[in-house]
């Protein structure tokens, strides 16, 4: 038998997550991040505990290729979820045009336009 179905309430972005949220591209905030948060409010246990032996602090990936990661706290007693960290290295793809593959990314970082 699975866990009972109940929706958790969103307790907001706290700490570093507030700062990191402002740096995310709008299409990420309103797309994959929002979708993952909505999914987590229905199933917060569908994530990995940050450390063995504890279950309150959890991590999960988001984005088409799982390039973003959320760290959040779940309070089962109050039925709330609080995001405390957002990792989005995907900004490298949009900021620096790393869409040409790993070699193109290395060349771009080094300032070279040759392959």
Image: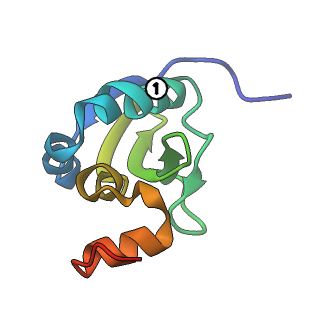
Return the residue found at the far front: 114
Residue identified by numbered label 1: 35
Give the number of callouts. Answer: 1
Q: Is residue 104 above or below residue 9?
A: below
Q: Is residue 51 above or below residue 39?
A: below
Return the residue found at the far bottom: 110
Return the residue found at the far right: 1
Query: Is the image coloured rainbow, by chain, by secondary structure, or in one colour?
Result: rainbow
For image coordinates 51% across by 31% down, the residue present is: 40
For mark 1, give the secondary structure: helix
Where residue 87 sits, quadrant-wise, is bottom left
**Badge 1, how many Cα within 10 Å: few under 14, some, many 20+?**
some
Image spot of residue 63 (x, y percent):
48, 41
> Is 68 displayed left or right of 39 in the figure?
left
Image spot of residue 2 (x, y percent):
79, 29
> Is 110 displayed left or right of 37 in the figure?
left
For image coordinates 43% across by 54% down, the residue present is: 99
For image coordinates 24% across by 38% down, the residue present is: 25
For image coordinates 47% across by 53% down, the residue present is: 67
Q: Is residue 4 visible?
A: yes
Q: Is residue 60 above or below residue 4?
A: below
Quadrant into which the N terminus falls: top right
> Is 19 displayed left or right of 56 in the figure?
left
Quadrant into which the C terminus falls: bottom left
Image spot of residue 57 (x, y percent):
44, 54
Q: Is residue 79 visible?
A: no
Image spot of residue 13 (x, y percent):
23, 39
Where residue 34 sits, quadrant-wise, is top left
Which residue is more in the foreground, 54 or 108?
Answer: 108
Return the residue found at the far top: 6
């Amino acid at each position: 038998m699975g866990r009972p179905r109940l929706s958790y309430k969103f307790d907001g972005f706290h700490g570093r997550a507030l700062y990191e949220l402002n740096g995310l591209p709008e299409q990420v905030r309103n797309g994959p991040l929002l979708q993952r948060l909505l999914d987590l409010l229905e199933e917060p246990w569908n994530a990995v505990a940050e450390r063995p032996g504890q279950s309150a602090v959890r991590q999960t990936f988001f984005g088409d290729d799982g390039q973003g990661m959320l760290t959040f706290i779940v309070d089962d007693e109050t039925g709330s979820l609080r995001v405390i960290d957002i990792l989005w290295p995907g900004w490298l793809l949009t900021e620096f045009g790393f869409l040409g593959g790993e070699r193109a990314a290395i060349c771009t970082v080094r300032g070279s336009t040759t392959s």
